[in-house]
Image (spheres, helix red, strand yellow):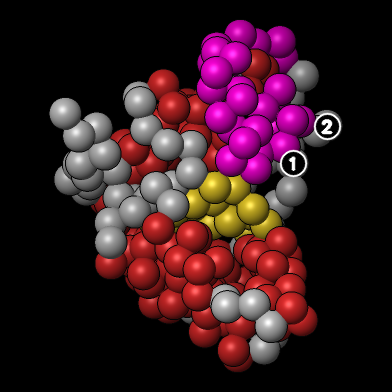
Amino acid sequence: MNTDLPETIDPAAVASEIEKRIRSAMDAHKPHQASNGPAVAPAASEALSAAGHGSRAIKALRTLHGPGFECAKSLLPAALSDGLLILIGPTGRGKTVIAAYLASERVKAGKSAGKFLTATEMLDRIKQCWVRKEDMEPVLNGWKKTPFLVVDEAQNRSEEKWDNHRFDDLINARYANELPTILIANLTLAEAQKSLGPRIMDRANECGGIVDCNWESYRK
């Protein structure tokens, strides 16, 4: 049985459910509130680590609560199928932990944790290809074809048109092949529209969602 078959996503319904759950959680949210977060099995933790998720984010899953947790649960159908999700907002809102949660739930569902990396790591790897005179296509294809991709700190991409073209091509290839992708950026909605461009933003609206993580910081 193929567990990676995409499911139909209604972006409007997803957005409505996200807003409803976040509003409810924000009413009850206390930044230092103790909470029993989602249980993460050792095998799932190992899979997340191998995919590139940091140990701090993996450990934080045990205490994920409030609006971040409600948001994460709302986004799960898109992460399990073919969604393009964009998480924006200030630092400290748990965006990276939300991505780790979605990856861990994929593992629980028998799917791949895929790959996690920052935009800086992505660009540095491309530059290594230039320096080493290495064929870049296998590297790019690895990101294009991984079953699940998370790109953190997407606002840290280069200003160079060539780099942005490659990034746009990567996201377009994953969209075309119905592979779930998460982009994380410490940006406002207006800044994200300028940084990521209309094509990426429109496709997220079509088959996943753009979430403004504007709740209170977990670091206070």
Number of the front mark, 2 or 1: 1
Q: Residues within 10 Å of mark 2 (few under 14, many from 20)?
A: few
Q: Is residue 119 above or below residue 98?
A: below
> Disc 2 versus disc 1: distance between alpha carbons?
9 Å
Amino acid type, mark 2: Lys
Q: Residue at x 61, y 82 (%)?
A: 163
Find residue 89 and report its horizontal and vertical position in percent. 64, 53
Quadrant for residue 4, please give it. Answer: top left
Q: Residue at x 39, y 77 (%)?
A: 199
Please state the extent of the stretch shown in magenta in the rendering.
33-60
For the residues labelled 2 and 1, say whether their Cβ atoms are less than 8 Å apart: yes
Q: Quadrant of the N terminus?
A: top left
- Which callout, 2 or 1, points at the residue further toward the start of the chain? 1
Numbered label attached to residue 124: none
Numbered label attached to residue 220: 2
Numbered label attached to residue 92: 1
